[in-house]
Image (cartoon, helix red, strand yellow):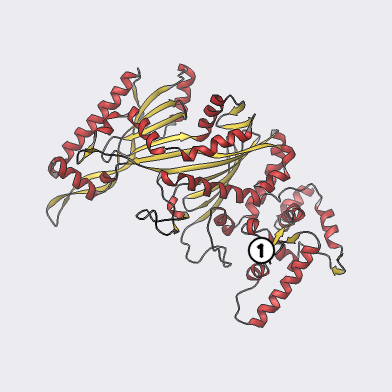
Amino acid sequence: MEQFITKHRAQVLGTLSGWDRVRFRGTFRVLSVVAGLFTWLNEQGVLLKDFKRFAKGLTGQLRASVEMVAEAAGKKIEYLASAALSKEALVQELLRREGVEQGLVCIFSCVDPCRSFELHRDPVKKQLDLVSRLRKCLHWYLYFLHPVWGLCHVRIQSWLPFTVHICINGREWLCRSLLAAGIGFRQRDNCLVDVADVGAAQLLLNAQPWIDWSTELEVLLSEACPALSELSMRGSPLRHYWSADETEWATDVMFRSPEALAELYPSLLRHAMTTFGSSDVMRFLGRKGMPRVAGVHPTFQGEVVSDLRRRPEGVRIKHRVNANSIKMYDKQGSVLRIETTINDARDMRVHRASEADPSGPKKTRRLRKGVVDLPRRAAISQSANRRYLDSLAGVETPTPLGKALDRLARPVIDHGHRSRGLHPLVGDDSRVAEQLLRGEFAVNGFRNRDICNLLYPPTDDQAEVRRQSGRVGRLLRMFRDHGLIYRVKGTHRYQVSAEGRRTLPAFLAARNADTTKLLQLAG
């Protein structure tokens, strides 16, 4: 990321990295599985034949609790006939019309799909049983203007197991924090385009993952539906297990003017579409050990997709690995946003101890969805954004392509060693140039063997391996003599130089260009 910022320092005001949208899920773990629900029903003295009546009674208690909250705030519960209606748009219109500054804004109810329980008569055993199924039931949406988080909402499922969701916006939260700290800023929609003290704003964002989420979320939920805190088991209140269902971590590069970003952004889009392959996308999102066959691991059974769409807030490119993604778009004219979205934490890996033995040895394990791993999730997302921006650092050069080719075509002499001219559009030179720009080399660099593995098929002939290494070594020496790469001191690794980042992407784009479109432009 530092490479990208350094290159465009004259046009950049600063960067902000932190949560955009976070959706939390609260579950009563004992009520979320059939076995746990059976245990709870037995304690309550409820027979299966009475389950429906008992569950309806609990739903009635929740409804009365939500209605009490609405009445205390002077609000009415508005039923929405379609779940497809934009609740956010309705809330924004209500805020403009009524000017609510704090507390409960409104309450909606609508029928949404959910996972719940139904009675099932087993024809073989000839007895009643409980089954977990996808079904539909009424949900309540309570929108609040929180004193710290700003606009947020609580979604409550009206039928067992009474799953709840709380959605907040990190940028809305940041704006409230900046106001409290007396730091000036300019905001457009859900985006800050300028901040008087970027460093102080970033410190506020850095603190967000570390708060006591379980306590804070329980407090807000108790305001939305006090009846949920009255459920108990073995004489103790049931407590929610809080997890992060969906997180969006955004890095905003704030440009000084829309014109500066508009000049650069088309080149960034072209580079992302034509250069980033499946292995690059997987590395951005933290996948390790990418092989050299077909760009993905042979055991990988998922899906890697990149797509480009034009949206009201700008043109965005999105790269997805299964349910997780990283995207880039120009927002509010002058902000370049890189955003990592994690919908499936289990697809990520972290180095941690077992949940059953927190003081035991650490191993590579699945990232947990629980809020306890939110700081780690933030670090993973920030690393993904950083890798993505690092790979964009070489995009856009004002040097005409012909002039750059002429310079590289001339032989150079370095410490008495003569290297021929380079031809990065054809032959072995172009093949090597293409590999040097791979995303996995952006951070740790590359070695001779890395390039050999990408250029040549695997072989057990050691003599052929040495010949391949020699050919690649000579090619790398030429790229080094021309100033396109440099050797990392004390290692056998190389990195693409600033000159290489400026020129090599242009050669790759020219090599992959559509001749028909080029002729149309020439005409």
Which percent across, then down, holds residue 208? 49, 37
Using residue 80 as the reference point, say whether residue 520 is left or right of it. right
Residue, x 47% and y 21% (percent of image)? 95
- Compare residues 437 and 78 and report the one nearer the observer: 437
**Location of residue 62 with respect to 299 vertically, above or below:** above
Residue 23, position as x, y percentages in the image: 43, 39
The correct choice, above or below, for 437 with respect to 233 in the image is below
Is there any visible trace of residue 389 in the rendered image?
yes
Q: Residue at x 60, y 31 (%)?
A: 192
Residue plotted at (45% across, 37% down): 211
Could one spot residue 423 in this view of the protein? no
Q: Position of residue 402 (x, y in %)?
A: 83, 54
Q: Residue furthest front?
A: 359
For disc 1, the neighbor class at 10 Å (few under 14, some 14 to 19, many from 20) is many
Q: Which amino acid type is shown beneath numbered disc 1?
A: Phe
Residue 209 drawn at (x, y percent): 48, 40
Disc 1 designates what residue? 446
